[in-house]
Image (spheres, helix red, strand yellow):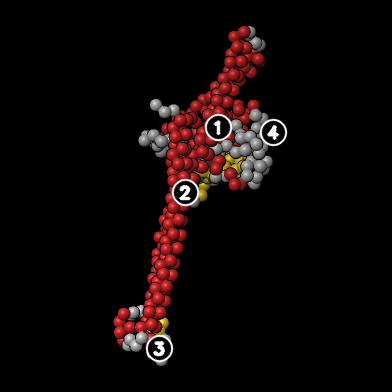
Amino acid sequence: MATPARQARRTRTLQVGFIAVLALCCAQLAYWTVDEIRYTLNVETRMRANYDAEVATADRLMRYGTPWREVAALHPNLTVAADSTTVSVSPAAIDALRAARFHRLNRYAWEGGFFLVVLLSAMAMVYRAVREEADFRRRQDEFLAAVTHELKSPLASLLLSTETLALRDPPPEGRAVLVGRLLADLDRLQRMITNVLATSRLSAPDANGPRETIVVADEVSAAVGEIRQYAAESNVKIDADVSNHLLIVADPEGVRLVFRNVLYNAIKATSAGGSITVRARNGDGFVRLTVRDDGVGFAPSEAKRLFEKFYRIESDGRSRSTGTGLGLFLVERYLARDGGTAAAASDGPGRGATFTLCWPAAHDPERA
């Protein structure tokens, strides 16, 4: 059974081979078009030579006394001048020869041009598919490397903390620090595994969960509570102010995953001493929740790509930011499943970022 790497090489080989065949077809088409044009011009040249020979023959016949009527019967493409002595090719024959040449050249141009456009379009599509596949595989390799790193770091920390507790009994303060570190590392592992499993479930037939009426403020408060320890360790302040009257219709599990990933992403992007603000408002049938941070930001051209699978922005122009590249991808997909949208905006690197999440609003008469 072929390995994924071998299968990928085989696919790329077939794609490159197909492009080579298409290029050969283009060359053959160009040769055919040029050859047909040359043939058409040669036919016209031979016909003109034949007409000239007919004119010479008609001249001799008339000099020997043959009546023009008999000469014209033998050479219908000729005409005689008013003096009944000068013979030439008739304008109708010349026009017919030119029309035939134009018709053949026009037909070859249209046929050759059509097939050339088809071949070039096929080459462009295959080339684009090769580039996209190469880009996807590169990001997939980066994802595997990122997952390995994301697993290795907390596991190493877990091992160190556990060995410390096993070898000696630290004082209560030290024990509390180690336990907090253990819980943080376990939470980091759980968050990553949750994202990977959620990504694999997106394509499942039963991926869509039940839609319920959700109080946005409650879910934001729960997400902030879950991630507050990580924010405190990163020295990042979270300011969440969401009205209790804002309701949405969505999958509860998806909403929790969206809030956790957006907040975690904002904390990662914010330097120590920075802050994150969470606000929400209702309008046009949607609840719009904004998460603003004063962190690293990103180039405006990368706004849409942030939600691509495995995509991570460049943090310093050389290296990619940490993480698996799945968090924002899941945010966009889960919002789309609930009929909402996700958008990102930034004024540039170092100027922070704003993420806007929209869900269909729900109306609860008791909260109106």
- Comes first in the chain, label 1 or label 4: 1
221 displayed left or right of 275: left
Position above or below: 5 against 30: above
Of badges 3 and 2, the one in the foreground is 3
Nearer the N terminus, badge 3 or badge 2?
A: 2
The mark that comes first in sequence, 2 or 1, is 2
Mark drawn on residue 142:
1
* The one of 278 and 47 positioned closer to us in this rendering: 47
Q: Nearer the viewer, residue 241 or 295?
A: 295
In the picture, the disc for residue 203 is none
**For the residue labelled by badge 1, is the local secondary structure a helix, a strand or a loop?**
helix
Q: Amino acid at mark 2?
A: Ala
Q: Earlier in the sequence, mark 4 or mark 3?
A: 3
Q: In front here: 226 or 82?
A: 82
Image coordinates of residue 267 in percent, x first then y, are 61, 33
Location of mark 3 (residue): 85
The answer, for residue 366, to whether it is visible in the render is no
Please name the amino acid that badge 1 sits on: Glu
Q: Earlier in the sequence, mark 4 or mark 2?
A: 2
User: Is disc 3 placed on a helix, strand or loop?
Assistant: loop
Residue displayed at 51% across by 25% down: 190
Query: Disc 3 to disc 1, how far (Cα)?
Result: 90 Å
The span from disc 1 to disc 4 (Cα, nearest Å) is: 30 Å
Q: Tell me the residue that label 4 is attached to.
A: 273
The Cα–Cα distance between marks 4 and 2, rounded to whole angstroms, is 58 Å
Dot 3 or dot 1, earlier in sequence: 3
